[in-house]
Image (spheres, rainbow, N blue to C red):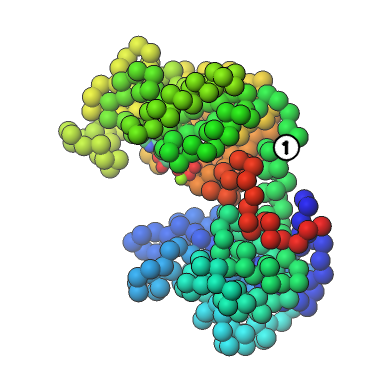
Amino acid sequence: MNKLTVRDIEVAGRRVLVRVDFNVSLDKDTGQILDDFRIRATLDTIRYLREGKAKVILCSHLGRPKTKADFRHLRLALVAERLSKLIGATVPVAPDCIGPEVERLVSQLRDGDVLLLENLRFHAGEQANDPEFAHLLAKLADVYVNDAFATAHRNHASVVGVPGLMPVAVAGLLVEREMQYLRRLISDFERPYGAIFGGAKISDKIGILSHFLRKANVLVLGGGMANTFMKAQGYEVGNSLVEDASLDHARQIIQEAKDYKVRFVLPTDVVVASYRKEGTAKAAEIDEATAKVIDIDKVQVEKGWSILDIGPRTVEHFTRELEQCKIIIWNGPMGKFEIPTFAEGSRKLADAIGKINALRVAGGGDTSALHRVPDLAKNFDYVSTGGDAFLRFVEGRELPGIAELTDR
Ligand code: ADP
Ligand code: MG
């Protein structure tokens, strides 16, 4: 990596401000933490700094606070509680992230202590990258560490403003690991290069699809986004999620794949299901009991049914197409995986990928949620913690939060 990391600097006795991404998902009703993988992802860095006798000051955002109630619910107390359990030491939360009281708490830290600052987004200056706000954060510490890979694409004060004000700004161990794997997807890679895309919408992924048309040798599409391509090719897709506004774009992509001589592979069979109530296409009304496999080239998807996953023949077909690849990137689930019946396609494909002798990397917001499931994760060399940051990076775009770090 061409940037300094925590391994390159002296941390003992120094105040180290670490930007982490503790933006965990919370239960809407109870406010409890649903998934603590983002907290776990930073443990290596926190342990490293504590063992190195640093005074560790953690800062993060949580959610998108707007209303008065948000300012109560989006406090970091529960995050601190979980972190305390994970590291086996009490992590207090400061009443704010800047100001005299925070400065006082920082001045009381002993070597190896950890302090968590309150939600950065309680100040508008965070998202606005306000210089004054950045200055008040920067003055809390001697060294800056970015270990918030999933936030590295944002031009926010704690991501780009603060490192610019510090004498030294380095990558944490998570960011270092992300870079090590993800760089292998963008340069000096072996061919054939295989890319698997799925998820909900083409419109979200137009940039990345165009990029991979120029880079990949095999492009495999499943999930909701494949529906629009299938419709563009004249198949009936019933009530499936489709973006009619993207039909022309889909045709253009199919044409470009021919021009670039990329193997462009769509599902050959799909899993469909109908709804409990007629005339609705609401996810909550999907009747899992009606799920069945349909060949896309023989059977039309009847009206009132939706395509919700790829079928078993498709899994085999995709696997054959990817078998020779030396590198495989995967973004976006193959089906509506939140309902277990429709997670099967993604699971089976992941198991098949696990047997291919290639560098296999998965990433994306929902993708990493799916692939974190341990028996899926074992099929990959690396599962990124990034959503948009992952997509941008593999598209070859610079991440501002990484660019701001001190060069080697
Ligand atoms: P990522 O966040 O990994 O980039 P996306 O946000 O693009 O992925 O897509 C994830 C969403 O796509 C999930 O909520 C999943 O339910 C949905 N999805 C996948 N396939 C289908 C489908 N056939 N019909 C409806 N939704 C789908
Ligand atoms: Mg998503």
Expressed as whole percent of the image width and height from the top left, the position of residue 366 reads: 48, 45
Q: Which residue is depicted at the point 39% across and 19% down?
A: 233
Q: Which residue is depicted at the point 53% across and 44% down?
A: 364
For the question of whether residue 64 can be seen, the reply is yes
For the question of whether residue 291 can be seen, the reply is no
Q: Which residue is mark 1?
A: 187
* Res 287 → quadrant: top left
Count of residue discs: 1
Expressed as whole percent of the image width and height from the top left, the position of residue 13 reads: 78, 78
**Left or right side of 234 for 124:** right
**Left or right side of 293 for 48:** right
Expressed as whole percent of the image width and height from the top left, the position of residue 234 reads: 35, 18
Q: Nearer the viewer, residue 245 or 220?
A: 245
Q: Which residue is depicted at the point 60% across and 79% down?
A: 136
**Left or right side of 281 for 258:** right
Q: Nearer the viewer, residue 81 or 383?
A: 383
* Res 299 → quadrant: top left
- Would the CB of label 1 be found within 8 Å of ligand 1? no
- Looking at the image, the residue that sits furthest to the top is 298
* Res 296 → quadrant: top left
Q: Amino acid at mark 1?
A: Ser
* The C terminus, quarter of image: bottom right
For residue 93, above or below residue 29: below
Query: Under tag 1, what secondary structure?
Result: loop
Expressed as whole percent of the image width and height from the top left, the position of residue 319 reads: 57, 22
Q: Nearer the viewer, residue 337 or 180?
A: 180
Q: Mark 1: few, some, or many residues within 10 Å (few <14, many ≥20)?
A: few
Q: Which residue is depicted at the point 61% across and 29% down?
A: 214
